Amino acid sequence: MLVSIRYFAAVREAANTSQESIDLPDGASVADALTALTTLHPAVANHLAAAMVMVNRAYVGKDTVLHAGDELALIPPVSGGAPKRFVVQPEPLDVRAVEALVDDPGTGAVVTFIGRVRDVARGQDVVSLDYEAYPEAAEEMMAQIATEIAATWGIENVAIAHRTGLLGVGEASVVIAVSSPHRAEAFAACQYAIERLKEIVPVWKKEQYRDGAVWIGSEAQYQREIGR
């Protein structure tokens, strides 16, 4: 099957082309395509560790199965630097992009946790959640969680992304991805990450109800806001 390949910036220079098509066996994965590309263009191999992969303009992991006519793009680090594994952002979260940050052919398991806004909490109908954060400190605390995970389970591949701002029901507020050689450790580390995040990461949420709102964590001392 033919798959279209696109290269950009330093990767384009290493491949000495911006676009080409390669013939892959049916059922080939992104990892298979990357192996084929490094055979065609050995200099590209030097850029793969820092590059992310898009298929049909969406970030994917290396185990993604390709189909005839797919467009695979190698995305080198953007001008702001290498992709960050720990980020707080107002933009919607891309689950596949977070997973791609921990993709590693040496691991046999990837566990992803997605925290979403639910429509009922504390017996109230939830309209939305409003998240506020101290972004710089929050990202440092996320990195600390990853350090604790590495010390406990020997896992180095951890990525955490958290939303800020007003989120509607069903939207993802946090994505945690962990990859490790074995699934048991990946599950344990992922659960540890979300529980630890709620303890030390400076992110706050305000639940918006139909008749008021409350900052979560302050239930024992808040004065409920009615009609605001």
Image (cartoon, rainbow, N blue to C red):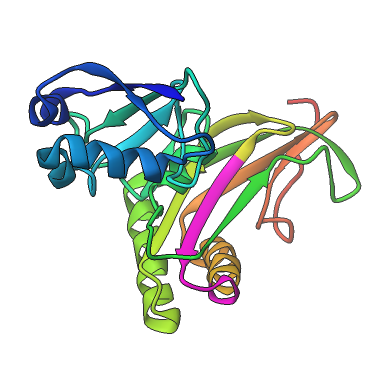
Q: Residue furthest right?
A: 123
Q: Nearer the viewer, residue 215 or 10?
A: 10
Asked whether 8 or 81 is in front, the reply is: 8
Residue 81 position in % (x across, y down)? 18, 38
**Residue 184 belongs to the span the image colors magenta:** yes
How would you classify the magenta stretch by its main secondary structure? strand
Q: Is residue 106 above or below residue 55?
A: below
Q: Is residue 173 visible in this depiction of the protein?
A: yes
Q: How many marks?
A: 0
Which one is in front, 89 or 192? 192
**Which portion, as a residue range, is magenta?**
173-185
Residue 36, position in %: x, y?
Answer: 29, 39
Residue at 70%, 58% in the rendered image: 221
Does the magenta portion include 111? no
Question: Which residue is drawn at the image coordinates 39% and 79% (left, top)?
Answer: 154
Whole-percent x, y for residue 162 in the image: 50, 44
Q: Quadrant of the C terminus?
A: top right
Q: Is residue 81 visible?
A: no
Q: Quadrant of residue 43?
A: top left
Residue 69: image x %, image y %?
47, 17
Depicted 31 relative to depicted 196: above or below:
above
Name the residue at 42% across, 54% down.
159
- Asked whether, in this view, residue 205 is left or right of residue 1, the answer is right
Task: Look at 39% across and 62% down and name the residue there.
Answer: 157
Q: Is residue 208 left or right of residue 200?
A: right
